[in-house]
Amino acid sequence: MGKTAAVTGATGFLGTHLCERLLADGWNVRGLRRPSSDWGRLADSDVEWYVGDLFDEPTLRSLVDGADAVFHLAGVGLWSADPATVERVNRDGTANVCSACQGADVGRLVFTSTAGTRRPQGDAEVADETDVAEPIGAYQRGKAAAEELVDRYAANGGDAVTVHPTSVFGPGDDSFTPQLLAMGLEPTMPAHLPGGLSIVGVDDVVDGLLLAYEEGESGEHYILGGENLTYEEAVDRIAEHATGTAIPARIRVPATAIHAAGPVAETVGAVTNRHVFPFSRGMARLATSQLFYSSRKAHEELGYEYQPLEAHLPDALEWYREEVRA
Ligand SMILES: NC(=O)c1ccc[n+]([C@@H]2O[C@H](COP(=O)([O-])OP(=O)(O)OC[C@H]3O[C@@H](n4cnc5c(N)ncnc54)[C@H](OP(=O)(O)O)[C@@H]3O)[C@@H](O)[C@H]2O)c1
């Protein structure tokens, strides 16, 4: 009999890939889904569904009880909800998962936070796990608070590790991946952003989640990153891979334009309760920075490896052409 995994966020981008991998590896997989969730690719799978949300404590308890691993991935970003909900779901939802685990017969909790709670300090080019940053915005605040809860759970005798993916790239994502691909592929969108980021393939993050379960040390944090690329490098490599040539007359959106949009986005949000990119002044500064990360700790302690962008492009492009553009 295989091991049992309990997965929150099973219906999401990363959760779907994780469930598929766990099933392929012979695990019994329990997934949390809300009554409203679209469970798309997993509809015909062997995932055993538990219906409820992160605030439904009896369902959470039965989800985790008897599980060898609890992968807590459920979370919400600023694109999908108002800031108060974003902070509450990420923080209090994680508190509920920790409480459910506390009273249950449960193995290791693997919590998925974000690399965004870390940033390069001073003149450093990359950030590692020690570079804890002042949170900017409700998403980072919620995740930072959740990390403290998970650390406390581990310090009080629970078994828990936290992983920090960078920008996850792959099929099934409805935000970052199609935006980046559009910047590289669409002649009507010949623009890219200033700044840069660490792009990690979704399959590499799934490997990292399993390695964190198998090899991680309780109470520890591991960045799961990929290649550090400027937006310009990333969109050129996407265009080159897809068409054989980089699109020459690409316009860099000036950082000043994005900085200027910060207060506008704040005002629109305050007046209409609609949240538009870059959401706030702080987020505008983030969007124009080089947010580069080191995955050295995960490599040395877990055996984590990541592939270059081109390794992830065939699957992502096929999905983009068949399901996003179609
Ligand atoms: N994608 C990235 O680039 C990235 C980078 C760093 C960290 N992360 C973190 O990785 C995790 C997974 O990200 P993702 O990209 O897969 O996100 P996603 O596609 O938006 O999926 C989010 C999942 O959380 C579930 N969820 C949201 N609110 C919930 C609630 N109140 N109760 C129960 N479930 C709830 C959603 O359920 P429904 O299907 O019902 O909406 C969905 O299954 C998140 O914690 C995210 O913060 C992602």
Image: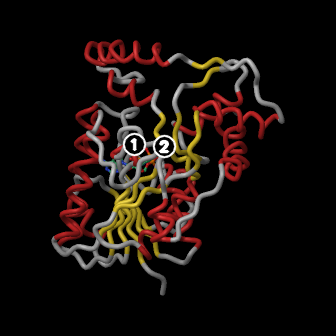
- The CA distance from mark 2 to mark 1 is 7 Å
Residue 116, placed above or below residue 275: below
| Residue occupying image coordinates x 40% and y 53% | 128
Specify the quadrant that holds the C terminus: top right
Amino acid carrying mark 2 in the image: Phe
Residue 59 in percent (x, y) is at 26, 62
| Closer-to-camera residue (38/106) | 106
Local SS, label 1 = loop
Residue 120 is labelled as 1
Local SS, label 2 = loop
Q: Residue furthest right?
A: 244
Residue 205 in percent (x, y) is at 51, 58
Type of colouring? secondary structure
Q: Which residue is mark 2?
A: 292
| Residue occupying image coordinates x 57% and y 63% | 305
Residue at disc 2, CB closer than 8 Å to ligand 1: no
| Residue occupying image coordinates x 34% and y 20% | 274
Amino acid carrying mark 1 in the image: Pro
Check whether the beta carbons of the residues at disc 2 and disc 1 lie within 8 A of each other: yes
Q: In the rendered image, is residue 63 in sight?
A: no
Q: How dense is the environment of label 1, judged by Cα within 10 Å: few (below 14), some, or many (20 and up)?
A: many
N-terminal-most mark, 2 or 1: 1
